[in-house]
Structures are given as C-alpha cells and as structure tokens.
Amino acid sequence: MIVKHPREYVVDKLQYALNPKTIAVVGASRYSTKVGYKVVDGLLTWGGYKGKIYPVNPRADKVAGFTAYKTVKDIPDEIDLAFLAVPAHIVKSVLEDCVEKKVKIVVIATSAFKEIGRGTLQDELTQYCRDHELPLIGPNLVGMGSPYLNFNCGFIPYLPIKGPVAMISQSGANLLAALGTSQKDHFGMSFFVGLGNKADVDFCEFISYAGRDENSKCLAIYIEGLDSPDAFIEACRSVDKPIVTIKVGGSKIGEKAAFAHTASENKGTNDAFYDDIFEKAGAIRATTWQEFLDISMALGMQPAPKGDNIVMITNGGGSGLLSCDHFERRGGMPMHELAEISPNLAGRIRAYMPMFGSPLNPVDISGTASPVQYKGAFTQVMRDPNVHGILGSICPTAVTDVPAVTDLVIDIYETYKHLGKPFIMECQGGEECQEAIMKLRDHGIPAYPTAEQAVNAMVALYKYGQIKNKK
Amino acid sequence: MGETLYTIGTDQQQAWMKKNCFPPRGYGYSEPGTYSLDATEVAAYNVAKSFYQVYPEVWNIDYIAKETGIKPADIKDRLKRMYDEHLIMFVMNPNVGVYGWGLYYWVVKLKDGTDPKVKAEFAKWYQNKDDICTGYLAEGDFDFFNGNHMRVLDNLLADVIQPWKDRPEVEYVHLCPIRADVRESLVNQWDVPEDRYRKFIFGEEQKKKFLKVQNKIDKKDFAIIEALNSTKSIADMFDFDMLEKLSGLDGKQMKKDIVMCVDERKFMLPMIYINYRALGISMHMYLVRMFQNVPSYRKAEIVDEFSLMPEFVDILQFGDSFYDCMLTVYTEVNDVEAIRRMLEGYAEIEEVKVANSKRQFRRWVARLDDDNGYWEECVMTDDFLQNRLESGSVKCRFSTDSEEVQ
C-alpha cells in the first residue's frame, strides 16, 4: 500500500526486526524439514542470537526444546518481533493477537495474498496494522538478518559475511542468491531483508533505516515495483550514502511475472519512468544482477573519485584495451592519456617498465612485470595529485608472482587510503586470481575477474561523485 | 451403473465414465492436483483445523446447543477440554481416488516369540515413517495394520515395505489395497451404499457401555461429538462468521465451497476423531478372508451388510488381496467373541484373523503419538513424480532417512 513519506514510527521500529531481544516464531513446527522449524533452527544454527525464542504452535508443547505457546497472547514476555510462518488464513488472527500483545514489529513470510488475487485481504490487514502502528514486513518473503549480530531470521540457508552493503530485496530467491554469493565471493553485507509484497513497510523506510545504520555504507535495492515512488525519492535523497538499484519486470512478460511473484504493479510504467525516478532519487541503476552486485561492493568499499582522471596499471595490454573501450562505451567517462592527466607522470612510471612497455593510459608495464615494478607504478599514480582513481590489473604470465602483487597492492592501499582515491583491481586468470580477488576484497579493495566489471565499478563510483556534487 | 454411485470428479469425467460398462478403478476421477489440500475450496476446513484448538467458536455452537440442549458456554468448555486432553482431533479424509492415489493397507505378522523390543522397533519405524498415513499396533493374529496413499505401487514396495520385509522376524506382510472405503472412525465414507454417506454410526448399546467403560468423555461430551459428526450438511458444522472473523476470508464463499467439496462432490470428509488410546480403551480388529470362489458382487453385498451394523468403527473392503475386508470395533463396548461368531456364520467367509489394538499411529496423516511430542503434527506426503526404486533419488517427503529407524 502507498506511503506518502517514510514513517518515523516504522523506521524507529525496524531495529526490532534486525536486532530483537525476543522473537515469537508463529507456526514453528516440530518437524525439522518444515519451514516453521527452519526459522527456529536458523536462529540457533548461526549461533549468535542471544535473545529469547518463543515458538507458537497450538498443537505442540515444545518445539526444538523451547516451550511452545498456543497463541502470541499466551507468551509471558514482551515480544519485539513476531515472525509468521503460517498459512495465509491464520495471519489475520495472529495480527490481532500481536496488536493486543503490543508486539513491536511483525514479519510475514506467508504467501497467498495479493499475488494470487487476495489484494483486498492484504490491504485490510495492512490498514489494520497501520491503524495500530504495528509495522508489517512482507508478506511473501524469506526473512532478514545481519552478520554483525549473527542474526538469521527466516528460512535462509546462508548468513552473509560482514561488510558494507545493505541488501534490500523484494525477491527472496535473488536475496538468497546474494547471500550465497556473499560467502562464496566475499561480498560483505551489513544487513539483508526480503520485502516480498511490501504491503506495509516500504522500500523508503528501509532506506531511511539503512541511512542511519553505521555498518551500512551502500544500499543495494532490488525492485520489482514501486508503489510509492515519491516516498522512495524522498528517502533516497535524505540518505548520504550511495544507493544502487536494479529494477525488473519491465518486459511484457516480466510485468505479469512481477505481479504473480510479489504483486508488483508495473502497468503504465516503462524503463524511462524508472530512469526518471532513480535520477531524481540520486540512485545508480544497474541493468544486470552481476553489475548490481559489483557496483554495490565498490560503492560500499571505496570513495568516489574527485574527477575523471583514472589511470590503469596493467601487465596485460589486452585487459587494458578491454577496459578503455568499456570506459568509452559506458559514456561520460572516457580515459585520458597519461600526458593529459599529469605531464611528468609517464616519465616517472617509465622507470618501472621494460622498454617495450606502454606509458599511455592504460599503462602496460608488460607481462614480465615484477612485484617491484607493480609497486613503483602504483605508488607513482597514487602519489600524483592529478590522478583521481586507480584501476589495477593482474594478468598472470609464467613470471607473474600473483600473491606478491596482491600483497603489495594491499600494502599500498593501506598506506595511501587517507588520500581518498578509489582503488579497484581486476585479476583475470586461474585459481590464483580467484584467491587474489578474495584477499583483496577482504582488505576492502573491490576486485573482479573481468575488465568490464572493474570498469563498471569505477564508473559507478564516478557517478556517485557527481550525484553527491549535485546534492 | 447407478447414477448416484459415482458422483465425484468433473462433469466431463462423469460423461467419460458413462461410455464404459464399468468405470475403471483409478481412472474415473480427477487428475492429481485438481483440488490441492490448501486450495481456496478447502478453506473452511483449513481455517477450522488451524483454530479449533484455541477457538471452539469455529464450531456451530448454536446448532450443537439445539441438538444437545447443552448451554453454549458449556459446549465450548467441553470442546476445549476434550482437545486439551487430546481425546479428540479434528481430521479430514481426502478421497484418495479423486486425488489420484491408490490406497494400500498392509498387514504384518511377526514370528511367534519375537522379542518385544524388536516389535517396539518396528512400531517406532512405522510411527515415524511419514508415508504411512494411518496405522495400528496390534496384539493377536497379526501385529500391525498400516496404510499408505501412494500413486505408484512400486514406490510403496521399495520405500515403505522393502526396508524391513526381509528381516528374519517377519512372518509375512500382505498387501490389502482398498476397494471400498465404507466407514472409518465411526463415520460412513463415500463408498457406503445409498444415502448413508457421512453418517455417524454408533449403536445405542455401544454408546451406553462406552460411557461406562471410560471416564474421560461423558454423556454431554459424547452428544457434542455426535452432533458435530452428524450434521446433515457440512455447512452445519462450522460457524462461518467466526471462520471469516479469524481468517479474513469470505465466510459465505467458504460455506459454498465446502458444501461443494464435501456434500456435493464428496472428495473430502472432515470429522471429529475419538482418540481411543487416550480413553484407555482398545480396538478389536477382524481381518476377514472370503472364499475365492465367492463372486465379487456377493463380497460387496456382504460388506454392504456390515455397513448396516452399528458395532463397527471401521469397515474397509480390499481388492486384489488375500483378504477381503477389515472390520474393527471398540473392544470394551462389544461382545467381541459374538461378533467373531457372527462373522464366521457367513458361509462365504473362510477365515477371520483377530487382533487387538491399543494404539493408532496416525489418523489420516495427523500424528497421534502424544508421547513423542508430535500430537496433531500433520504430515501430508506424496510420491508424485518420484521413483523410489532408484537409490539416492530425490524423495519428496518430510521425514529424512536419518530420522527413520533403520
């Protein structure tokens, strides 16, 4: 349902969804293979939940060793969060119990509401919650959590690693994909939440919440439909952090699929409509899922460049060419020759490359580049005040010592971090490159396996700089 | 074929069946999934099933009061108490033919002298095996009588029977595929002749004794159960305003739908089950084998005759089996020997095996094992699209191999 502005009582209470002291799991099952059990199990499995768990199941005396209660009202404690994993026909009654119990926030995992034609029922329940200032997240979602609190609430098989990205997603499946990616690809998150049908709590309120959350450095938002574009714009503009969006459901079939999935209504909208919203909001729009993740990571880790003088240091001319072409293709940010950026920089870098290297931009220090040459070239561009950002590339040859180059990149980054220049790495090749990427990411350097991904990340940082300048 | 005998399935199916001299069993009904058990059409049952533990108001209290003369507040208290003491459970029998399953019972006899611990091990396995939707532990001529709804007979044999069938303690296991589901837990099912479908059957003599031999359900309690199980229409069972209030769904629509499901198309039968184990009484079970030269129409006639007898709690007729039917009575309220003699008085009956059951594992997928902490855990399984003969194949079910007793 539409919200005109981010509601303060909702934003205030979102803390209880992500850091509750007491949780009522309504529909907690005794069967280990059922969803209702997985919610309790998830809270226990990830080890960090220190609050109290109260299963609600009118048929059971105990669930997972905890005393079970017939209704929320029967729980002899204050309840911060009620997580509902029950059939749709039970939700209304549970919400009434939650209001009576003065529960602070409810999360409804249950499907079978507006997305299957029960829009009136969903709206009635939403209005009931609004009348009683009980924020409702969902329905039709997988859950939420935070690695900083080891909190995993829902039927979610992963807990992401700690990091800067607040992941706010309408889709459960894609959220889970991101969470899985987090562990595998060292994509760090501050918190994550599935919004599902977003009957009540809207994007705008989680955006406001993420804006205040100190662990969140970048907001990544997966959208199937916006019910309240004005509130979205208002919330985004009030947040002094980069925001990345991906909007799906724009194709002819996608429009119908988005409604069937999360009851998202896209009739009468098109890509230009959303481009306009994101432009007004100051959000950066990604077009593919990979780009969405890549640029979110970069924006969470690195500052925006102060200008468009980006220098690329590579030991592979090919990766340099892929990069400079892609910079131009993305528009608005072509690479400049080294001589244009800083007249003496080329000369200084020459000392770190063989005679057949290329001191243009991209700077090709050649396939024989040693860690010493990498270090010298990187240090030169880092120290040059005319350089606004550095793109490094490792293309392993038989003589490339990838681990040593990785370590020196980390060292240089740590040494000169205070200069506020974005540093992005690309490492294309085999297993050693994968390891290098993970290590770089663990040290706060966005690193990617392809040149285009690295360029996309740098372009996003640059765009964010422009957005900030406009604000 | 009589027009009224097979009234389930769509109009198209009915039309198709009329082209055949005999509607082939298993093909005259709906395809799988026509009405899933969480479908909108089944909402009234599901809402009542979800709330009756806490809100006895889901029942049609005014109707019960009128039928029994008991005050509404007392009715609610009694329903609540009977549930809290696990004496009753609200359950539903889906017509497996409509849903595309076969209904396969099987009887197990362990060798004489088998260590009780081994029998307990078998009981534990059967109790935990979710594919067994109904089952009984017994003492006497046989030891277990269990049933499965399954789409593929091979899946039953490979995944439910095979794991223990070749154990040295097993004397025999005989399959008893259901031909007619006539009565279960005192309520006539869809295969009862004439217009006796969904009638609650309990003889006056049995009722009198029932109220004497146990002290947990009294006359008023029983009158309430009887009223709920004896509504002329399923619509009289529920308070649809209350169902609407609790669920937010349209009460009028729920009423219309449930009448269609239960009264008109007869593909599901909700009812109150009496948990005889909790009452401390037992069930006497008669496994009946008729001579093979008895014509099948006569076998059916005999079962129809049984359906007129109010002693029987369950009446199941089998096809393609060593046995022809299973009959049960509450032991303590009947002269079980006289019933045996009555059965043996039929010239067509070759043999009657007898056993006594003090424990039922599940009632139509709802677990009854309060002692294991699983009271009313409902575990609906389906072997749809599965090949359980393949080792390591995906098995869509709730229990896992590690949870089953090996």
Image (cartoon, rainbow, N blue to C red):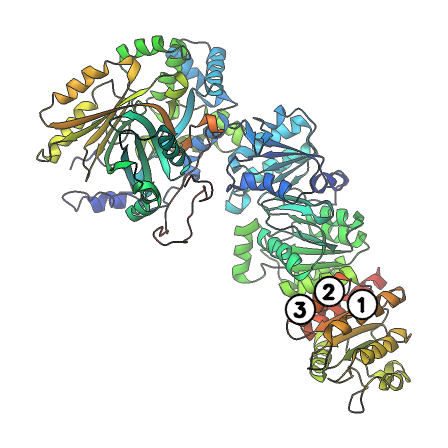
Q: Residues within 10 Å of mark 1 (few under 14, many from 20)?
A: some
Give the CA separation, mark 2 to mark 3. 9 Å
- Residue at 67% of width from left, 73% of height from top? A450
Secondary structure at numbered mark 2? helix
Reply above or below: A29 against A284.
above
What amino acid does circle 2 point to? Lys
Q: Nearer the viewer, residue B177 or A205?
A: B177
Pick the front one: B343 or B232: B343
Q: Earlier in the sequence, mark 2 or mark 3?
A: 3
Quadrant position of the N terminus of chain A in the picture:
top right
Residue A271 sits in which quadrant? bottom right
Specify which label sits upstream in the sequence, 1 or 2. 1
In the rendered view, tell whether residue A380 sits above or below residue B47: below
Q: Which residue is mark 2?
A: A439
Q: Is residue B203 visible from the viewing direction of this image? A: yes
Circle 3: residue type: Gln
The disc at residue A78 is none
Query: Image point 35% across, 32% down: which residue?
Result: B134
Q: Amino acid at mark 1?
A: Ile
Residue A79's x, y, as percent?
68, 31
The residue at which mark 1 appears reads as A410
Q: Chain of mark 2?
A: A
Residue that badge 3 annotates: A434
Q: Position of residue B96 (x, y in %)?
A: 31, 39
Do the CB atoms of the residues marked 1 and 2 lie less than 8 Å apart? yes
Residue found 82% across the figure and 65% down from its top = A304
Tag 1, which chain?
A
In the image, residue B34 above or below residue A251: above
